[in-house]
Amino acid sequence: MNIKAEISKRTEEINDILEHYLPKEEGYPKTVLEAMNYSIHAGGKRIRPMLMKETYELFGGSEDVVHPFMAAMEMIHTYSLVHDDLPAMDNDMLRRGKPTTHAVYGEAMGILCGDALLNYAYETATLAFDKTDDAEVLAHIIPKALRILSVKAGIYGMVGGQVADVEAEKMGLSLDEDKLRYIIDNKTGALIESSMMIGAILAGASCDTLQKIETIANNVGVAFQIQDDILDVIGDEAVLGKPIGSDERNEKPTYVVLHGLEASKEKVKSLTEEAVDILKGFEGDTSFLEEFLMYLVYREK
């Protein structure tokens, strides 16, 4: 399998889906709508909607009901990046090789853009109700998926992880292994868990299967974040599309800071291998997901 070609193909398909759900740039709120679309169009690996769609199809899903959730997930992920880049947070001026949203539209509009993307994500996700006539899906499955989306993105998920991260970084609070893992589990892992779990839920997967998917996704999320921290130390700025060394400049607590570079690399490897082993236990074609997870580990950006 040419994994890069397969990822590129799927990314194009996801971008087409996203385009369908983006707002029109018109009316009095036109500026924030432009900022929203600018932020989405800035690119990205589309990892979360890709994981959602592949998990959905792995368990037999074949309808468009997953599409609004895919778009919503990318909007939530993008809003978190827009806010991460703000002066009060990481104060980054480049993202994916392009000026960040607040660098183009100003800090106030950067805040509003993130707010708008988050709210519009839920508005978009509810469009899944228009994609099916199945009574069970309408009454139980879509609401369950919406709950996962909401919880994993909120105070008991990504936002909670961000709070602990900001306190550790900006306020100089002590950081031990438990708190660092909490930050990684929630700040990065929660949306990846949400993506794969929603895919499984929409396809009608069992509770036992859902638990296994959550474990796989948590491993992937933690490994992905540690790899991101590694790249901030040894990555190529031209490849990454953003400045390296920002974690050190911002005195940001990371797994690499706590455990060192080599131990971090080994942790990424072991977490990913465990996730792939669980994945192989499912029926159906898991080949792309297996390759994709391994690709994420050894990515250069």
Image (tube, helix red, strand yellow):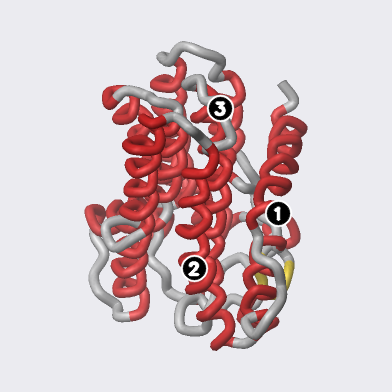
Sequence-wise, the earlier of marks 2 and 3 is 2
* Residue 275: percent from left, percent from top: 42, 28
Front one among 217 and 172 = 217
> Which residue position is annotated with label 1?
19
- The span from disc 3 to disc 1 (Cα, nearest Å) is 24 Å
Q: Which residue is mark 3?
A: 289
The answer to which of marks 1 and 2 sits earlier in the sequence is 1
Residue at coordinates 71% horizontally, 40% vertically from top-left?
Answer: 13
- Amino acid type at mark 3: Leu
Where residue 159 appears, as percent x and y from the top left, is 35, 64
Q: Residue at x 39, y 50 (%)?
A: 149
Q: Are marks 3 and 1 in contact (CB under 8 Å)?
A: no
Quadrant of res 268:
top left
Closest to the observer, 157 or 173 = 157
Quarter of the rendering containing residue 113: bottom right
In the displayed structure, 22 sits above or below 171; it is above
Q: Give x and y (percent) for residue 166.
A: 35, 73
User: Disc 1 versus disc 2: distance between alpha carbons?
Assistant: 33 Å
> Which residue position holds label 2?
247
Q: Which residue is at a point 70% across and 57% down the rendered structure image?
A: 43
Q: Vertical placement of 223 versus 184: above or below?
A: above
Assign a secondary structure to mark 2. helix
Drawn side of residue 281 relative to residue 10, left or right: left
Residue at 31 percent across and 69 percent down: it is 163
> How many numbered marks have been drawn onto this rendered protein structure?
3
Mark 1 residue element: helix
